[in-house]
Amino acid sequence: MKKHQLLVVFLIFVSMVFVAQAEIIVTEYGYLPFGKKEAMTTEKAESFSLVDKLTDREKFSGEKSEPLVDPATGETVYRLNFTDRVRGGDYYLTVGDLESRTVRIDSGAFNPVFVRAMKKITAKRGEYGWLDDNDEDNILLSSYMATRGLSYYETFMDRFGDGELEVPEPEQNNKIHDYADELIYGVRGLLKWYKEGSLESKDINELAAVVSAFAVSGRVLPKDSPELAKEVEQIALGSFEYLSAHKKEIRKDLWMLLLVELNLLTDDKEYETQFGTELEPILETGWAPINSEDLTGFAIGEMMKKSLESDSPIYNSYFERSVALLIAQDRDPYYRAVVFEPIEIEFNGIYLDRIDPVGIGSEGLYMIDLNEYYKTSVWAKAAQDQLHYLIGRNREGIDYLEDGSLETVFHIALLSANFKDSSKLTRSGQIVGGVFQITFYFVLIFAGITLWQKYSNKKAERNVEE
């Protein structure tokens, strides 16, 4: 009898452990109204429900996806897709006896993500830009953040505003976007570093990275900080001769980035010719995920800003790589947010062969750039997947905004910035809200045309009478 009782207790314990392990993974920060809305679960029930949190009424009932196996744990997982069912409000998901945390659907879902990420970056301000994860000055990382941050600002300036971040008091309400204030601080730090000591005393790779940041600043900052832009532009152009003499000592990716930024700054074909020579072998092999240790892909992406023709080898390489990423994502739906396996056939270069949040975030930014160049919303959706993964919709349950490296947090900031205030027209080309606003403008324009026609007709009648 006692053995029977012990067995029953054991089975109950095992059952409780199993239930505790089962889960529904949703994005804590929310979903965009017209974005893809997916969750994941390990629960075996055949269907799921989306329930209105306010009324506790079921809003939608659907079937789970086909079972997928998590390669890391061997567990079976399922996707719950409720993309086209709701446009706004607070909900929760149920699968069997499981209930998820609140699912918020809102056009400003990613606004807090951007603010929190930038707050963490601002907190890392150091003497020469930003301190790394070990609270040390890191010139290469600061240069990368300034360069990529300004490049992003150049393309997506409409996503930023003044008074939206917790910046130091002197930078508040100064008619400069708070995001630009942060980047200007970084450039000023790099300028301080540049002026300390001779060029010969500096690490050649750090110098090349800093000069690239100066070249971008000279192109992007004339409106927000004209004196700084002019000063660093002159330094960038004046430093090239010294750097060119030490070309063999400079990391190839940093040399390529310097060439393309100087080309974009001056439109001097000599820089473009040298860049093309460096690029030839890379077009055959592809490039690795972008981070501060390898800026090859970023340099190629910058060259895309020259509105290249579709027969350009750079254009073709950029597009081929993007297609390879989508093929790989579709091949393994569980990891649609990131590819963990190298692509052998479609893409011959080195890709993610391990979980690397820095690379994951960077690929999301690459997808946003693709969306800008090709004007097709599939890239924006892929970038949203990357962001959702990084802020917690992953099997490990890691929120990389809270626990990621500074570089990963910076990538999250830029990813979330692209989707801020999505009640307006987004870069995906979709209208994701603001219907009343758009309708109002349509009616206003239509009324204006009608009044103009009536005025023109009356004027024509008077001319006839005269």
Image (tube, helix red, strand yellow):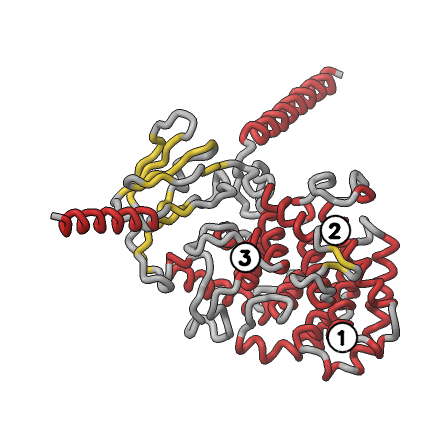
Q: What residue is drawn where x is 68% and y is 53%?
A: 121
* CA distance separating discs 3 and 1: 32 Å
- Secondary structure beneath label 1: helix
Of label 2 and label 3, which has the lower sequence position? 2
Query: Which amino acid, by three-letter code, is at mark 3?
Result: Gly
Query: Which amino acid, by three-letter code, is at mark 1?
Result: Glu
| Residue 419 position in % (x across, y down) | 57, 45
Please tell me whether residue 383 is drawn above or below residue 82 in the rendered image.
below
The residue lying furthest to the front in this view is: 2
- Secondary structure beneath label 2: helix
| Residue 414 position in % (x across, y down) | 62, 52
Of label 3 and label 1, which has the lower sequence position? 1
Quadrant of the rendered image containing residue 254: bottom right
- Residue 300 horizontal side relative to residue 13, left or right: right
* Dot label at residue 364: 3
Quadrant of the rendered image containing residue 440: top right
| Residue 158 position in % (x across, y down) | 67, 44
Looking at the rendered image, the disc whose residue lies closer to the viewer, 3 or 1, is 3
Return the residue at label 1: 270
Q: What residue is drawn where x is 18% and y is 51%?
A: 7
Q: Could you classify mark 3 by the number of other residues whose Cα lies within 10 Å: few (under 14), some (14-19), or many (20 or more)? A: many
Q: Could you classify mark 2 by the number of other residues whose Cα lies within 10 Å: few (under 14), some (14-19), or many (20 or more)? A: many
- Residue 222 horizontal side relative to residue 324, left or right: right
Location of the C terminus (image quadrant) = top right
Name the one closer to the observer, 426 or 148: 148
